[in-house]
Image: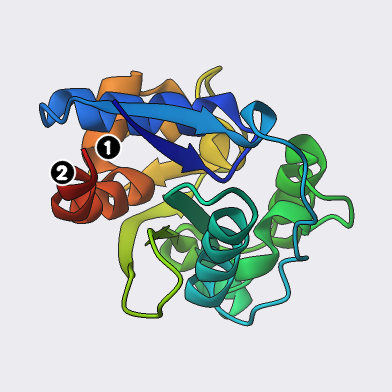
Amino acid sequence: MSRLLVASRNPKKLAELRRVLDTAGVLGLQLLSLDDVPPFDEAPETGATFEQNALAKARDAYAATGLPAVADDSGLQVDALNGMPGVLSARWAGRHGDDEANTALLLGQLADVPEERRGAAFVSVCALVYGPADSASSVARGEWAGRIAREPRGQGGFGYDPVFLPAGVELTAAELTPREKDAASHRGRALAALLPALRRLA
């Protein structure tokens, strides 16, 4: 069985990739997280784009372990904030990964914004690196359009899911089942676009 390193410590991201692979019938890949390999210096996410950050994370993980590595960089782009928080989504309130603080700050910034200007999109870029050459990589981008709710709803998902209303749906992303979310989400779409490369690895 081939091993694939998911350059993350978020178990929900591993579970999401596992579901995408299982649904597509891609067998023969053992998924590892950063907690399953010896620690290495992870470069800070200083890229100006999701693509730069995802590729940097995947290249670092491959260089440190020799294992094919997949990494994603994702975030929320809000129309009324000129596309922000974007690549700063995970640390919008100042501390990396504080979902509640990030969401509270976002809702505060949008408090006076009317419904018709609350448009937003989740963006995910997934990068797969399986060799030292630049050509030994694949990058895929997925987007999920919607709008920002007035208050958080739902217990599922993570990040900004409780305040993101996907287009055409009256449930937040945190109220969808994992399978419903995989079928529509930005990361689900980006991972699905990587499936041909992942099949070759398997």
Place of residue 18 in the rendered image (x, y in percent of width and height, measured from the top left): 33, 26
Crowding around mark 2 (Cα neighbors within 10 Å: few <14, some 14 to 19, many 20+) is: some
Q: In the image, what residue type sits under mark 1?
A: Val
Residue drawn 42% across and 29% down? Answer: 31
Q: Distance between the residues labelled 1 and 2?
A: 32 Å
Tally of marks = 2
Q: In this view, does 118 lie above or below 182?
A: below
Residue drawn 59% across and 48% down? Answer: 65
Place of residue 185 in the rendered image (x, y in percent of width and height, measured from the top left): 32, 44
- The front one of 153 and 131 is 131
Q: Residue furthest right?
A: 94
Residue drawn 62% across and 62% down? Answer: 60
* Quadrant location of the C terminus in the rendered image: top left
Tell me which label, 1 or 2, sits earlier in the chain.
1
Place of residue 158 in the rendered image (x, y in percent of width and height, measured from the top left): 58, 32
- The front one of 173 and 107 is 173
Question: Mark 2: which secondary structure?
Answer: helix
Residue drawn 49% across and 34% down? Answer: 13
Question: Mark 1: which secondary structure?
Answer: loop
For residue 169, the mark is: 1
Image side of residue 101 versus residue 36, left or right? right
Q: Is residue 156 above or below residue 171?
A: above
* Quadrant location of the N terminus in the rendered image: top left
Is any atom of residue 177 visible in this view?
yes
The residue indicated by pointer 2 is 199
Is any atom of residue 74 visible in this view?
no
